Image (cartoon, rainbow, N blue to C red):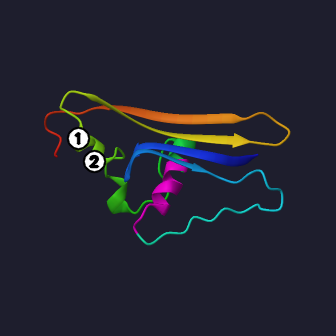
Amino acid sequence: MKLSKITINDYRNFYGKKVIEFNTDIKDKNIDLIIARNDTGKTTLLNAIYWCLYGNEQFYSTKNSKKQIMSHKKISETPPDRKIKLSVSLVFNDEKGPKYDITRERIYKRSPEDED
């Protein structure tokens, strides 16, 4: 069973729809690397996977664990009293077996008191 695709919609600093597809077709290539500068979302990506599977975030420091998981940019552009949806989807597949899609989503309603 291999993780073949991650789709993130408005989760923390991932504004909008972001899709990462991993190479699962080549038998001799078993590793995909995610390389980026500090503070660009590598840990957020890991937390998105964990949140999708278990419903909580495992890898945040105490100061970040209390922050809203909805994209701040999405909150600021949404009119008050409108619903906002964030989601994380994972696709697992195997050469011989079925494909599994796992999705966790959360729907918020922006209150007039939310900061811009």
User: What residue does disc 1 label?
Assistant: 77
- Of residues 67 and 2, the one nearer the viewer is 2
Would you place residue 5 above or below residue 111 in this image? below
Q: Does the magenta stretch include residue 64?
A: no
User: What residue does disc 2 label?
Assistant: 73
Where residue 29 appears, x then y in whole percent? 77, 62
Q: What residue type is labelled 2?
A: Lys
Would you place residue 24 above or below residue 30 in this image? above
Mark 2 and mark 1: span between their CA atoms?
A: 6 Å
Residue ID at (69%, 42%) = 92
Left-right relation of 30 to 96? left
- Of residues 50 and 78, the one nearer the viewer is 78
Q: What stretch is highlighted in magenta?
A: 39-49
Cβ atoms at labels 2 and 1 below 8 Å apart: yes
Principal SS element in the magenta part?
helix
Where residue 107 appears, x then y in whole percent? 37, 31
